Amino acid sequence: MHTQHKIILGNSQQMPELQDGGVQLMVTSPPYPMIKMWDALFAKADPKIAELWQKLSADCQEETVTQIYDAMHDYLAKVWQETYRVLADGGIACINIGDATRTVNGKFQLFPNHARITEICEKIGFTTLPYILWKKPTTKPKYKGKGAFLGSGFLPPNAYVTLDCEFILLFRKGSLRKFQPHDQTRYDSAFTKPQRDEWFSQIWTLKGTRQTTSELERRTAAYPDEIANRLIKMFSIKSDIVLDPFLGSGTTAKVAMQNERNSIGYETDQNLLPIISKKIGNSKANMATDVQIIKR
Ligand SMILES: C[S@@+](CC[C@H](N)C(=O)[O-])C[C@H]1O[C@@H](n2cnc3c(N)ncnc32)[C@H](O)[C@@H]1O
């Protein structure tokens, strides 16, 4: 099957390249609010967030921390809103997100990103479906958020539970997707019984990419191919269009190509183009595909 893949170097808060209802599936992992490695990106992308961090260093107010957290989710919400527009009726949105724990102004806090995104997506009009917990077996327990437990970790009561799961939130736009009876492409896209039994259970234990990828890819916090592979096979059929509005290193596009789906990816960081091209290029061998790179 011949497939097409578009990499758009631009901001996915607006996707003028896509018409209403033209995409069947969205699979993505955004920058995570209140996780330190993404602070600089949020501040660069939205001057209001940069100003709020400056305000916090001057006023040290809890309220300012809340405003930063809200502003980061406002930034992401524009992408969820635009995703809703471009998804077809019955289309599914899959969002990989982790909660954050952080001590700001000397106060330990949990930032439940998964709950905030769920509330925002419901307000937009999505129907929330049961989510998946991605359990990463390598995460080490921490003591007071700092390093390993060591000996003191055996003494109650000041340790807290390690965040060793991320969420894969699942949403549907509108009603169930409709097909003609005996739609051949749908049958050709079927998964097996063992796949169904494993993939449609709520906990997925999968290694992160840390063990398997280059330094540059690790800096994009790429998710493992297997996450994209399962989601694409569970929620789309061959020849569908899969969107990733936060493309990073290009995992979603690569896996969509391998599964005979078309793809569209948005990425603001032009420095990632070589790594995206390499990832997609390696998969392209022996496949009938067109890849288009569009600079806004
Ligand atoms: C967590 S990474 C995605 C990792 C990706 N799943 C992978 O496997 O490589 C998030 C990416 O979103 C990009 N990004 C942030 N805001 C964006 C926006 N408004 N539009 C497009 N890309 C954006 C960042 O530059 C970053 O590369």
Image (cartoon, grey):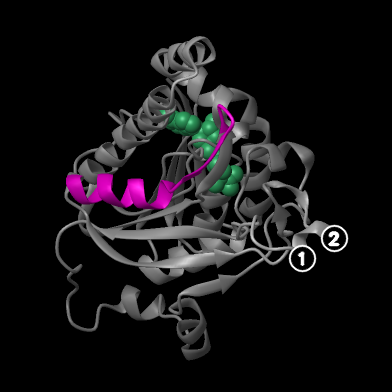
Q: Is residue 239 above or below residue 56?
A: below
The quarter of the image holding the C terminus is top left
Of 156 and 179, the residue lying toward us: 156
On screen, residue 48 versus residue 141, left or right, reads: left
- Front residue (pair 122, 271): 122
Q: Give the SS element for disc 1.
A: helix
Is 185 within the magenta? Answer: no
**Magenta stretch: includes residue 121:** yes
Res 220 quadrant in image? top right
Amino acid type for the residue under numbered disc 2? Gly
- For the N terminus, the image quarter is bottom left
Name, please, the residue furthest toward the bottom: 193
Q: Residue at x 55, y 26 (%)?
A: 105
| Residue 43 locus on image (x, y percent) | 50, 19
**For residue 124, what is the image quadrant?**
top left
In the image, 23: left or right of 36?
left
Q: Which residue occupies 71% across, 43% down?
A: 218
Q: Residue furthest front?
A: 156
Provide the residue designation for mark 1: 154
Residue shown at the point (61%, 57%) measured from the top left: 160
* Location of residue 54 in the rendering, given as x and y in whole percent from the top left corner: 50, 11
Residue 8 makes an appearance in the image? no
Secondary element at tag 2: helix
Instruction: Classify residue 211 by image quadrant.
Output: bottom right
Residue 122 image point, x, y percent: 21, 51
Which residues fall within the magenta stretch? 104-123
Position of 125 compared to 262: left or right? left
Q: Is the residue 2 above or below the residue 121 in the image?
A: below
Residue 34 % position (x, y)? 51, 35
